[in-house]
Image (tube, rainbow, N blue to C red):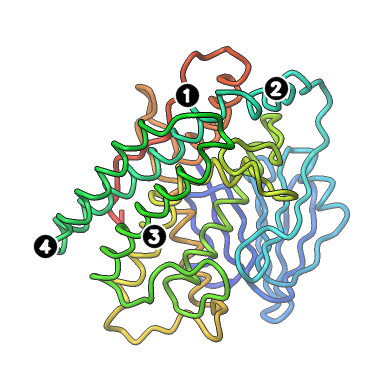
Amino acid sequence: MIKIAETKYNKAAFRHDSMDIIINRFGTRIRKSGERIVLFDPKGKTEKEFPVRKISKIIVLAPSSISAGAVSLALEYDIDIVFLGKFGMPVGRLIPSKKGSLSLIRQRQAEAANSGMAAILAKKFIEAKGNAQLSFLKFLSKKYEADFSQETIRIETYLDSLHMVSGSMPEMRSNLLALEGNIAGQYFRCIRKLVDFPGRVTRNAKDSVNVMLNYGYGILYNELERNCLYTGLDPYIGFYHADRYGQMSLIFDLIEEFRVPLVDVAVVGIIIKNANRGAKFVSNGVLLKDGKRILVTRIYSRLNKSMNWHGQRIKVREAVKAQVLHLAHYLTGREKEYIPFKLEDYHPWR
C-alpha cells in the first residue's frame, strides 16, 4: 500500500493509497525516530509517523525544516527529497549517491542525439502527444456532447503529415515544431469550448487553467527527472528539444507523452467540476493553497491509478518509470523499437 500525506493534520490529511509524503503546511518539521519519518506541526502541536520502508518520496511544497537524521534515513532507503517552487517546478532535490558505471547509457544517448535516431524519437514524442490529445477530446466530446469534429479532423491530418517530414534533426526541427504547434492550437480551441480561458499561455499566466497546467507540468517534470537520474539517462541530452542550451532537454522530450493523460485531464476535470462553485484557485498568477492541494492530490491520484502495461496490472507511476527505462534500453540496443506511453483512461474523476 502507498501513502500520501498532506500536513494539514485533520481527518482527511493522511490518505492510505500512496507512498509519497507531500508537505504543504508552513513550518512543518521533518525528523526521524528510529526507522520512521516524523512530521510535526508546531501550530497544531500534532505529529504523524510514517515507516520509512513505505515511503518512496518526500515532496516539500511549503517552507519547512528537515533534520540531518531524517535526510540520512531517507537517502539510506533510496527516498529522494524534492523541493518544489511556487510554479510547481523542482528547485532542488536530494537523491541517494549510486555507485556503478552508467557511462554506456550516456554514451549511446549522446550518439543518438547526433544521429537519425533523434528524428525517429522526435516524431514518436509528437505522435504520442497528438494521439493523447485526440483521445481526450473524443472523451470530452462524448461526455459533454461537444462538437469537435473539425478540430479533430485537422489534428488527424497534421499527425498524418508528420510521417512526410524528412531530413536530419536540425533540418526537421522547425517543421516538427510547427506541426506540434498546429495540433496544440486545435486541441486548446476545443478545450476553450468547455472552460473559460484565453488559450495556452506558458509564461506569466494569470488564469486558473494555465497556472494549474504549468504547475502540473512542473510536478510531472520532477517525476521524469527523478526517473532519468535513477535510470542513468542524462537529462540534458535531448533529441527533439536538443537546441535548448542549459535546459534539461530530455525531460522536455519525454514530458510530451505524459502531459495530457496525467496533467491536462486532472486540470480540466478540476475546472469543470468547480465551474459553478465560485472556487478561486489562483491570485496574481500564483496557485493558492487550496488550488495547490486539490491539483497535487489529483495528479498523484492519477499517478497511483492502476493500468494495463504489457499484460500486467501496475501503477501508472511504475509505468512512467518503465517507460524511461524502455528509452534507455532502446538507446543501448536492447530493444529494437521505441513504443510511446499510452494510457487508455481519460476520465477526469476516476
Q: Which residue is mark 3?
A: 266
Q: In percent of the image, x 29 and y 65: which residue is there? A: 189
Q: Secondary structure at mark 1?
A: loop
Q: How many marks?
A: 4
Relative vertical location of residue 150 with respect to residue 112 in this rendering, above or below: below
Q: Which residue is mark 2?
A: 105
Relative vertical location of residue 31 with respect to residue 65 in this rendering, above or below: above
Residue density around tag 2, few if under 14, some if 14–19, many if 20 or more, within 10 Å: some
Q: CA distance from mark 3 to mark 2?
A: 34 Å
Q: Which residue is mark 4?
A: 145
Of tags 1 and 4, the one toward the viewer is 1
Q: Which residue is mark 1?
A: 338
Q: Amino acid at mark 1?
A: Tyr
Q: Earlier in the sequence, mark 2 or mark 4?
A: 2
Q: Secondary structure at mark 3?
A: helix
Picture coordinates of residue 178 (x, y %)? Answer: 43, 50
Q: Earlier in the sequence, mark 3 or mark 2?
A: 2
Q: In percent of the image, x 70 and y 63: which residue is there? A: 39
Q: CA distance from mark 3 to mark 4?
A: 20 Å
